[in-house]
Amino acid sequence: MRITALRTLISAFTVVLCAPISGGAAELIPPPKTDSKGWIVTVSVIGAVSPSFPGSGQMRPYPFPAVAVRRVGEPETFSTPDEGFGFPVFDYGGLRVGPVANFVFQRGQRDGLFGLRRVALTHEIGGFVEYHPFDHFRMRAEMRQGIDGHEGFVAAFYADAYESVGRFRLSVGPRINFGDNNYANAYFSVTPFEALVNGRLLPYTATGGFTSAGGMATIRYNFTDETAVSVYGGGQRLLGSVGSSPIPNLIGSRNQFNAGLALSYSFVVADPLQYLPEPLTSLKP
């Protein structure tokens, strides 16, 4: 699970990458009534709480913004807060494929981590595959490589059932995560020297595999076509080698929870090409 904020390199990358943000093909909110030209920009302000590091038992608040863009007349696509930021380059017959990015906050030495190595802010890039086998259900997989920080390979698998009832939209589904040896070692291994300095932890070497399993649920209420509020929450249980690490078992928790509240506002930005002279405008596809 990752509740992310827009920071440093990703803050600029995300604004571009979220247009349109990855998700399903079912219409969730009708676009604001206007002509067929231009773009719908959705700006969200999100307040979230999540573990201060992978395996932590301490929850920390993380306020952050998000931006999504789609063409006027294009239906909003289904997405959930725990996804990476991505957009499709292939979208046909319920199948969507494209690049994705995510990042994980740095791990310092607070919350019982004294003496352990620091793990820098991690930027992850990769790709996603998403499929809607039938209405109101989607499956998604993300594969991402950490280019700094933990420097490991991770994968996340999602399945969500969602439905709109009046102005409400509800969704719920399971989650499974994978991490390789580099990822597991960065967050869950303890060297003999680190154990000696820390005084509470025992030496341990974590290995990769399926790292956690759990679920996520969201509720959104649309005040109007332009404004909405969302509440979400979920939890996962650390598995395998990382779940047996002394870090979650002695100073943290194997149970990882997250929750958040998002306020969103959508508005229309005119397509600048519509103001070009007619001969050039006619060349638009």
Image (cartoon, helix red, strand yellow):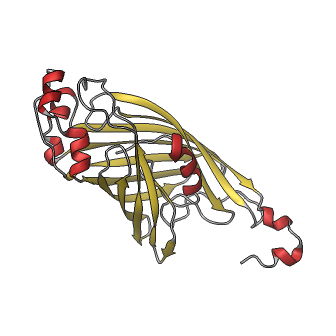
Residue 247's image quarter?
A: top left
Q: Does residue 18 show up? A: no
Q: Nearer the viewer, residue 76 or 58?
A: 58
Q: Quadrant of the C terminus?
A: bottom right
Question: In the image, 196: left or right of 10?
Answer: left
Residue 198 appears at what percent x and percent y?
Answer: 18, 22
Question: Which quadrant is home to the N terminus?
Answer: top left
Q: Residue furthest right?
A: 277
- Depth order, front residue of 76/100: 100
Q: Nearer the viewer, residue 60 or 276?
A: 276
Task: Specify whether 58 is left or right of 224.
Answer: left
Q: Quadrant of residue 39?
A: bottom right
The residue located at (62%, 56%) in the rendering is 69
Q: Is residue 260 visible?
A: yes
In the figure, is residue 181 to the left or right of 166? left
Q: Residue at x 35, y 55 (%)?
A: 145
Give coordinates of residue 192: x percent, y percent.
11, 31
Residue 71's quadrant in the figure? bottom right
* Residue 98, image x, y percentages: 47, 66
Q: Residue furthest front?
A: 193
Picture coordinates of residue 152 (x, y %)? 29, 51
The residue under the point 50% across, 73% down is: 91
Q: Is residue 275 above or below residue 107?
A: below
The number of numbered discs placed on residues in the rendered structure image is 0
Q: Is residue 237 above or below residue 39?
A: above
